[in-house]
Image (cartoon, helix red, strand yellow):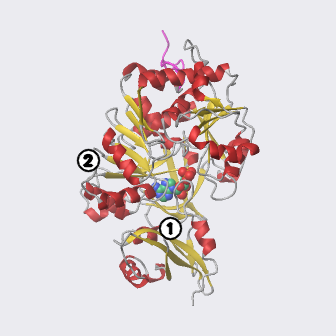
Amino acid sequence: MQTRTESLQHTMMRVPLTLPHFLERAAKLYPKVEIVSRLPDRSLHRYTYADFYRRARRLAEALQRAGLRPGERVATLMWNHFAHLEAYFGIPCAGGVLHTLNLRLHPSDIAYIARHAQDRFLITDDVLLPLIEQLRSQVSFERIFVVPLAGAPVPAGYESYEHLLDTATGSWDYPPLDEEAPVGMCYTSGTTGRPKGVVYSHRSLVIHTLAAALPDALGLSQRDVVCPVVPMFHVNAWGIPFAATLLGCKQVFPGPHLDPPSLLELFESEGVTLTAGVPTIWLGVLEALRREPDRWKLKLRTLVVGGSAAPEAMIRAYDQLGFHVLHAWGMTEMSPLGTVSRLKSTLVDLPEDQQYAYRAKQGLPAPLVEVRAVSDHGEVPWDGKTMGELQVRGVWVAASYYGGEDPDRWTSDGWFRTGDVVTIDPEGYVKIVDRTKDLIKSGGEWISSVDVENALMGHPAVKEAAVVAVPHPKWGERPLAVVVLREGQQATAEELREFLAPRFARWWLPDAFVFVSEIPKTSAGKFQKAKLREQFRDWSWG
Ligand code: AMP
């Protein structure tokens, strides 16, 4: 027996936190639950977790037989569908690293990223071969495996993904996997400078999955039918495919059909209860629902909105339709979950307007994520007013970029500088005021472009609005609003100014309103403010 003074050891097992557990659990407990994918010809591909399990393991075995060594990168360039999910598990279970390439980037940027990551193999969709042709000369993948979604024969120079799976025997066991081993790789969207790589570990991903599924985070249950509209190349579709597999939820993938009627039709036919995507997607879906309110019978409960700020008007509009918009903030460097905006039990009795003001903020830090806001004068108080740069720390936050690039993004005491300017209120809700570079400095004072554009999007005639800084001879910079009106609606600059006037100090109001048919967006659907700033740089203030 130990004496009281001997140092006490814990008596718990040390089981590595690795991905094969997800696959094993789903197949043992939920073999009959379905995974449904919309194919390019709009037909639905259906199979069960039992099928998925067999194929993901075959992929792992086949990759090992093809010579994949631990830590080597296998890139994917794919839409959201069953084969991409197979890659999400098959590659890591083989000891490889899943590197999701963003198909919306320019071909030369995709090639740069694949070269930079030293991707060895590529798995892609047959319908994306025209894109591959544009970048193939710029990057040398050893082998390219093509998923026959459209069913056409695989052209010369490529190999069939199905033939790759056929090389597996099916009697195979997982290699030993260290929880600290790399599992996935994703590049930042690179709005400034070259994209940079973030490498996730089994451990960071497993813990992120548990936290993301919690009721106060995304709130997933096995009984949910989950449809990530956010691309699987955008920070692991926010971790949803991993969480849904661990829990055994029915999963529904939209393939390449992301227009509002196609999404709504899929939600209806498959009984989707939880979905996720950027605000642009949900603004379009809202328009479609308003145009034809009785067309779709939906079981939808939650729309997770992130990637850009969810306008308060949009949250209110969906509430009226009976759907809960859950506003969340994250980053590639954070796997991506950072904050989620749910009302605390002590705030649910507030007047409605105040409740919405909280829900439109980016929210409370997730468990295991620490936040602080820092200005030139040090850490700022949590008073909901003082702005500072948001810095974060946590188990699933990157400690460096691949190759050690841009080390200045980390403080000397080990926090990651997000580049987002925020206030944090006394309740702990984080509110993003701007990206550091998007803030507008007028007469030496800061204006939050995000606040003004979100208010503008509350005007009934406005579909989208972006507010940017334009050089001004007297004030240094002044705000200019770029506005897209809703179909068939009218509004003048005067009306919009009057609409904003009660909400802001006079000097925050945009001095000019420009009406356009579309706002340029990044590959992830965010407003490309840098492009707008460039476009209006020589604006004549008159
Ligand atoms: P990415 O790494 O591509 O996911 O981009 C991360 C950046 O997107 C963050 O630093 C924010 O600037 C922005 N972002 C993500 N979610 C939100 C949100 N809910 N509200 C405002 N900005 C957001």
**Would you say residue 350 is visible in this rendering?**
yes
Mark 2 lies on a secondary structure that is: loop
Residue 226: quarter of image? top left
Q: Seen in the image, is 150 located left or right of residue 224?
A: right
Q: Nearer the viewer, residue 81 or 243?
A: 81
Image location (x, y in percent) of residue 218:
39, 43
Residue 297 shows which numbered tag? 2
**Would you say residue 426 is visible in this rendering?**
no
Residue 518 shows which numbered tag? 1
Residue 10 on the magenta segment: yes
Q: Amino acid at mark 1?
A: Glu
In which quadrant is the C terminus drawn?
bottom right
**Mark 1 or mark 2, which has the lower sequence index?**
2
Residue 433 shows which numbered tag? none
Residue at the (50%, 61%) spot, across then down: 422
Q: Nearer the viewer, residue 106 or 531?
A: 106
Q: Are marks 1 and 2 in contact (CB under 8 Å)?
A: no
Image location (x, y in percent) of residue 102:
60, 47
Q: Cα distance, mark 1 to mark 2?
A: 30 Å
Looking at the rendering, the stretch of residues picked out in magenta corresponds to 1-17
Q: Is residue 541 above or below residue 481?
A: below
Q: Seen in the image, is 540 located left or right of residue 386?
A: right
Residue at the (34%, 71%) spot, across then down: 460
| Neighbourhood count class around disc 2 (C-alpha, 10 Å): few under 14, some 14–19, many 20 upward | few
Residue 541 on the magenta segment: no
* Mark 1 vs ligand 1: CB below 8 Å: no
Instruction: Determine the residue located farthest toward the bottom in the rendered image.
Output: 542
